[in-house]
Structures are given as structure tokens and as C-alpha cells.
Image (cartoon, rainbow, N blue to C red):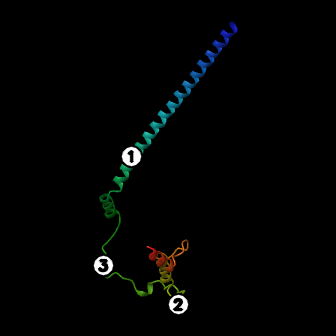
């Protein structure tokens, strides 16, 4: 009988130690969650202050004042022009004379592909005889 009592007491001590360990783990995890929530709150506050500072720095009136103060811009005169000799050379023409415009051909291809009446190839267009046969039956 004494052995049974010792076994029961041992089981109770083991159960108490196990419950205590679970409680300590849960307390540690709760503290970690609280720390993470505090860090999240700090990061959100930092983001909010950075957004407010960005809005202040990006204000159109402030930017206009800075541009007027620091950029030496002057109004454009109608007489400001450059001579033709300073223009860059015309790029070479890679198409043969009389050949079709390659960009126009691309546009035509795109328009043909976007045609809603065009068959995609996955479904065969109905035969004209089949349409008439179904129309005659009704």
C-alpha cells in the first residue's frame, strides 16, 4: 500500500511540475506578444510621423517657393532658337523604298487580333448549313 501512496505522490509532483512548466511557457509567450505589440505600435507611430513629414516636404507651395529661390529660371523668349546645323542627323531608314510601313503592319495585326468576330482556333466556326438546319427545325 505504501508503494501505491509513493506512486500517487510522485504522479502528483510530476503533474504539478508539468502544470508549472506550462504556466511559465504561457507567461513567457504572453510577454513576447506584448513586446511585439509595443514594437508594432512604435513602428506605426514612426510611419505616421514620416508620412506627416513627407506631406509637409511635398507641399506644392513649399516646392514652388524653393524652385523660385534656388533655380535660376527665366521666361522663354520667342526669339530663342538654334540654327539648323546644330540639329542631330536624321536616323537611317531601314525599310526599302516602296515597302509597307512596318509599324502600320503591326497595328493592323493587333486590330485583326482584337476583332471580336475572328475565330480563335479553339472553337470551330459553325457551318452555314448547320445554322439553317437548326433554324428550319424550330
Q: Which circle's residue, 1 or 2, is located before the other in the chain?
A: 1
Residue that label 1 marks: 48
Farthest bottom residue? 98
Vertical order, 90 against 55 (above or below): below
How far apart, in angstroms, are the residues tagged by discs 2 and 3? 43 Å
Q: Position of residue 10 (x, y in %)?
A: 65, 14
Secondary structure at numbered mark 1: helix
Q: Is residue 80 above or below residue 14?
A: below
The residue identified by callout 3 is 77
Name the residue rendered at 52%, 87% in the picture: 93
Please tell me which of labels 2 and 3 falls first in the chain: 3
Nearer the camera: disc 3 or disc 1: 1
Tell which of 76 and 15 is nearer to you: 15
Closer to the camera, 29 or 14?
14
Which is in the foreground here, disc 1 or disc 2? 2
Earlier residue among tags 3 and 1: 1
Q: Is residue 1 shown above or below 105?
A: above
Q: CA distance from mark 1 to mark 2?
A: 61 Å
| Residue plotted at (68% across, 6% down) | 2
Front one among 71 and 29: 29
Q: Crowdedness of circle 2 by 10 Å Cα count: few (<14), some, many (20+)?
A: few
> Where's residue 124, x and y in %?
54, 74
The answer to whether any part of residue 110 appears in the image is: no
Q: Is residue 77 left or right of residue 133?
A: left
Q: Quadrant of the C terminus?
A: bottom left
Find disc 2 in the rendering and name its residue. 99
Q: Nearer the viewer, residue 102 or 126?
A: 126
Query: Element type at marker 2?
Result: loop
**Cα–Cα span, label 3 and label 1:** 46 Å
> SS at mark 3?
loop
Numbered marks: total: 3
Amino acid at each position: 500500500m505504501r508503494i501505491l501512496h509513493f506512486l500517487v505522490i510522485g504522479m502528483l509532483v510530476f503533474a504539478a511540475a508539468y502544470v508549472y512548466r506550462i504556466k511559465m511557457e504561457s507567461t513567457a509567450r504572453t510577454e513576447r506578444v506584448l513586446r511585439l505589440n509595443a514594437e508594432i505600435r512604435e513602428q506605426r507611430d514612426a510611419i505616421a510621423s514620416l508620412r506627416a513629414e513627407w506631406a509637409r516636404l511635398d507641399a506644392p507651395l513649399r516646392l514652388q517657393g524653393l524652385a523660385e529661390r534656388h533655380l535660376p529660371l527665366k521666361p522663354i523668349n520667342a526669339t530663342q532658337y538654334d540654327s539648323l546645323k546644330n540639329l542631330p542627323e536624321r536616323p537611317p531608314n531601314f525599310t526599302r523604298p516602296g515597302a509597307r510601313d512596318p509599324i502600320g503592319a503591326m497595328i493592323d495585326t493587333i486590330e485583326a487580333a482584337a476583332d471580336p468576330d475572328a475565330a480563335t482556333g479553339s472553337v470551330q466556326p459553325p457551318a452555314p448549313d448547320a445554322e439553317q438546319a437548326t433554324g428550319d427545325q424550330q
